[in-house]
Image (spheres, grey):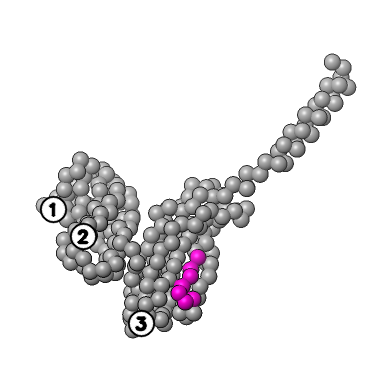
Amino acid sequence: MSRSRILLWSIITILSWNVRVDHVRADDTPPQAPTDFSAYARPQYSWSITFYWTPPPDSDLDRYEMDVTGSPCESLKETHCGTYDIPKTTTGWTYHNANLNQSHLYYFRLRAVDTAGNTSAWTRTLVFTSTDVADGSVSPRTFELLPNVPNPFNASTRIEYTLTERAFVELDIFDLLGRHVTQLAGSTHVPGSHSTTWNGRNDAGDPVPSGVYYLRLAVDDKLSVRKMLLLK
C-alpha cells in the first residue's frame, strides 16, 4: 500500500472515531435514586421532621432535591410547598415548620441530581399529618422501623420507630444464629415517633462480641426487621 493511501486511511479512521465519540454521552445516564429513605418526627414548638437516606453510588452526584407538598399547601405557613436543594454530602436533613392547620397531610420525597442535571427516580413518598396545633405535633402515617444510627456502631446505636396507633410494642435483638440477646421494649406505646438506644449488651448486662445482629420490631400482627453491625 502506498504512503498516500496509508495516510488517507489513517485520516478517515481518525475522523470516524471522532464522530463515534461525539455521539456517546455518558452524562445522559441518570443517577441512581437514594435508598433507605426514612424519617423521624420530633414535636417541638416549631415542629420538625428529620429525614435519613443512603447515598447512591454515582461518582458525579451533585445534590439532592426534596419535594414537599401539603394538603392544602397554604397550611405550610412558614416554608411552604416546593422543591429544596440539599448538598450531596448530606444524609440527614431536617424540615422545620410551624402554625399548622390541624389534621392536614404533608408529603415528602427525594431524588438525586448529577453534575449534568440528570435526575434519578423519586424515592417512596413519606406522609405525615399534623395532630395538635397547640404544640406543633406531627405524626407519621406509616408503621416503620428506621435504620439504626450509626451502623456499623461501637459503643451504642440509636434506634427509632414510628407507630400509627396505640399498640403493644416488642423490640428485640437477636444474634446471627437467631438466639435472643435482649429486649429493648415490651409495653404499650402511644401513636407517634419513639426512640431508644442499645449499648451492645445482653439481658444479663454483659457486652456481646462483634458481629451481625438483627433488630426486630413486633407491633400486633406486623413485623419489621433490620440488620445491625457491631464492631469493637
Residue 219 on the magenta span: no
Determine which residue is flagged by label 3: 133
Q: Earlier in the sequence, mark 3 or mark 2?
A: 3
Give the residues in magenta: 67-73
SS at mark 3 in the image: loop
Q: Nearer the viewer, residue 91 or 34?
A: 34
- Residue at position x 33%, y 55% from top? 147
The answer to whether residue 218 is visible is yes
Q: Residue furthest top?
A: 1
Q: Residue at x 53, y 70 (%)?
A: 82
Please identify, in this view, whether the residue under mark 1 or under mark 3 is nearer the observer: 3
Query: Which residue has dot 1 on it?
Result: 203
The answer to which quarter of the image holds residue 178 is top left
Cα separation, mark 1 vs mark 2, equals: 23 Å
Q: CA distance from mark 3 to mark 2?
A: 29 Å
Q: Label for residue 220?
A: 2
